[in-house]
Image (cartoon, rainbow, N blue to C red):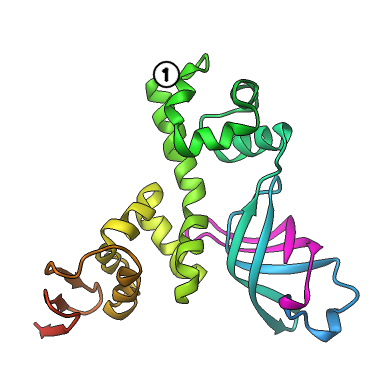
Amino acid sequence: MKVQVERVLYDSPDTGFHICKAAVLEATQEDMIPKPLLGSLETLTIKGYFPVNKIVNLLVKGSWEKSKYGYALVVNEFKEIIPPTKDGIIAYLSATVYGIKESMAKKIVGQFGLQTLEVFENSPEQLLTVKGIGRQRLQKIIDSYKDSRSIQEIVSYLAPLGVTANKCAKIAKAFGGEAMNVLLNEPFRLCEIEGFGFLIVDQIARKTTFSLTSVMCCRRRQRKDIFAIGSLSAFAMRICF
């Protein structure tokens, strides 16, 4: 389902959890819309862990929840859709990237046009050619941009494994813009996050090119358990302290 956030009903800055009223732009049979809403679904309530930005639209998937307030879509997966226009990119950058105000966003887009986001993704050092951006400012811009994109990349990567948006938000909060690097190269660091046990982390690790031939330990915060992965198998030994 394609939606656009219109109003924030509840916001938790600490966890990234939101409840919003959103306009429905597109819906299909795959969205499994409840019968009472069929034919009249112009707006709906969405709740979960997703970026709130009125500049972009969201493609959302999830499950329906009914309460005394009516139906709400609990978002499990999402994808940001940035308007593919110069004005849309200017608005997106100035609204989401720390250190880029509208005037700077216009300079950047004026130089790189519709390839601006590609520059941010693949060759951000090119931004040094924009007047007013030095190396120190560039690093802050890169870090902020990575943080803003991190949660979407995590959800896209882990949703097929059944990892909830809630857990994805925890990963993004714990590792920031380095979250995808951790997932791809050091997945067992997820054990540092409360609520991530060996089984789910091992499943995530198997999705990557991470080698199970090296011995690694996963310490859970709330329980003093150590899980060791042997070089020839994924057998886990539990050592109780």
What is the three-letter code of the residue carrying label 1? Gly
The residue nearer to you, when weighing 198 against 6, is 198
Left or right, residue 232 beside residue 135: left
Provide residue 108's location: percent of width, then percent of height. 59, 24
User: Would residue 163 be visible to someone looking at this image?
Assistant: no
Label 1: which residue? Answer: 134
Provide residue 201's location: percent of width, then percent of height. 31, 73
Secondary structure type for disc 1: loop
Chief secondary structure of the magenta span? strand
Left or right, residue 139 beside residue 41: left
Query: Is residue 10 found inside the magenta-colored segment of the image?
Result: yes
Provide residue 53's location: percent of width, then percent of height. 65, 49
Q: Which picture quadrant has residue 209?
A: bottom left
The residue under the point 48% across, 17% down is: 129
The segment highlighted magenta reads 1-30
Which quarter of the figure is the C terminus placed in?
bottom left
* Relative vertical location of residue 78 with respect to residue 54 in this rendering, above or below: below
Specify the farthest residue to the right: 39
Query: Is residue 24 found inside the magenta-colored segment of the image?
Result: yes
Q: Which picture quadrant has residue 104?
A: top right
* Relative vertical location of residue 215 with respect to residue 5 in this rendering, above or below: below
Provide residue 118's location: percent of width, then percent of height. 54, 37
